[in-house]
Every structure is written in C-alpha cells, then in structure tokens.
Amino acid sequence: MHPKMTLPMSAEPHTRQPGPGRPKDMEKRAAILEAAKALFVRNAFAGTSMDAIAAEAGVSKLTVYSHFGDKDNLFREVIRAHIQDLLPEETYAYEPGADIRDILLRIALIHARLDCDQQTVGTFRAILSDCRQGLPRYGKLIWEEGTVRTQALMERLLGQAVEAGQLDIADIPRAAEQFFALIKGNLVLRRMFGCVECNEDYAREIEATARAGVDTFLRAYRPR
C-alpha cells in the first residue's frame, strides 16, 4: 500500500473566486447603452459618434468598442433592450378562457400609448432625419428589432385565437398589420407633425381610438 500523499500548500485545491471587475464591466455596459439611447434620439444615428457615446457614458472609446464592436451593433442592442423592456414577450400572451376582446384591448392600449409617447415620436423624427440624408440604416434596425418582432408575436397570438375558435382569420399576417393600423389611426402622425398637444384630451383620444380599433377589428374577424 502506498503511503498517503499530501499536496504542498501551493497545490492544494481552493475555491475559485470570481474575477475582479465583473460588476463594473456590467455597469459600464449599462452606462454605454443609456448614453447611446439618449444620443441616438437627440442627434439621430448619423449625428452620433462613438466618441460622443464614450464621453456621455464616462468611459473610453476603446471600452465602447470592446463591449459592442461597432456603432451598428451598439444601436441594435440599444433598440433590442429598449423594446423588450417596453414590450416584453408576455405582452402578447394568449390566455385560454379569456375573452379575446379583453386580450386585444390590453395590447391595443399599450401599443397606442407607447407609439404616441413623446420619446417614441422623437425617435421617429430622428429616423426621418437620417433617411432624408440618405442613411436608412437607423430606421432599418428599428424596423427589424421592433416592428418585425412585434408583428411576429401578434401573429402568434392571433393564430392561437383562431385555433381556439375565438377568431376567424384567413390571412393572419395581414390581419396583424391591420390591427396595429386600426388602434392608432393618425394620432402618431399628428404628434410627429406638431398638430396636437400632449394633454388629457390627447390621452383620452388615444384610448378612444384604441378601443374603436379593437371593435372594428373584431367586427371583421369574430366568427359568424
């Protein structure tokens, strides 16, 4: 039998401690995302530099690049995080047994209020500014991370409602587009063009338009 071997102190196993700086790295990443979000809305995509984002976040430009690679990736992350915070996937959850009108009305009010919000309208204006300068990249990223995602989630919900017999829809993708158009009417454009003030009357009109849109949608797609 071999004698029991002991390891020298330097070779004894030990619990590995987390590497230093990890919380600070996450704090820096969050600061960069917040800075980028503010600057993109304020100056549009074309008018926002990585230098400006670094300065706003209080980090070096090298830190910004090490976290996100380039401005396109950074902006995509900004949009993805922002939209998922505002419109998490559970927003579009189908609830078996619930009245489809209640589900659609909940989604309609969330979307209508969000799209007519001052910050959202400011973002739309920034998109138009970039497009006017021949730089549609900003708008395309928002479209891919925002509209395409919510459209897919809405199509899934409508499909579940069709399977449950609560709706009768032949073309679900088109119906999802119609839903989003009906619940907002021209309220977003009026806000973008400065034709309406954000006050209690406007808030009531947002809600009334959303409710009327849901009722119109259901008149078209409720089973007969």
Image (cartoon, helix red, strand yellow):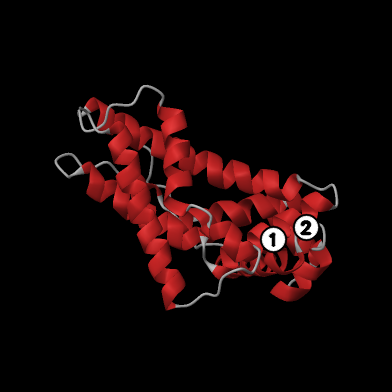
Tag 1 residue: 125
Q: Is residue 14 visible?
A: no
Residue sitting at x 14%, y 41%: 97
Specify few, some or many for label 1: CA neighbours under 10 Å numbering under 14, 14-19, or 20 or more. some
Spot the residue most to the top. Answer: 170
Q: What secondary structure is found at the residue carrying circle 1?
A: helix
Residue sitting at x 47%, y 77%: 199
Name the spot of residue 48 as percent of width and height, x first: 79, 63
Residue sitting at x 23%, y 50%: 102
Residue sitting at x 85%, y 47%: 134
Specify few, some or many for label 2: CA neighbours under 10 Å numbering under 14, 14-19, or 20 or more. many
Q: Which mark is residue 24?
A: none
Q: What secondary structure is found at the residue carrying circle 2?
A: helix
Q: Are marks 2 and 1 in contact (CB under 8 Å)?
A: yes
Q: Quadrant of the C terminus?
A: top left
Name the spot of residue 222 as percent of width and height, x first: 25, 33
Marker count (numbered): 2
Tell me if 134 is positioned left or right of 28 in this view: right
Q: Is residue 174 above or below residue 72?
A: above
For the residue marked with disc 1, what is the amino acid? Arg
Judging depth in this view, the residue of 99 and 137 nearest the camera is 99
Tag 2 residue: 129
Q: Is residue 219 above or below residue 62?
A: above
Judging depth in this view, the residue of 48 and 158 nearest the camera is 158
Name the spot of residue 78 as percent of width and height, x first: 62, 57
Tell me if 63 is positioned left or right of 167 in this view: right
Q: What's the distance in space between the residues labelled 2 and 1, CA to CA? A: 6 Å
Name the spot of residue 171 as percent of width and height, x first: 41, 24
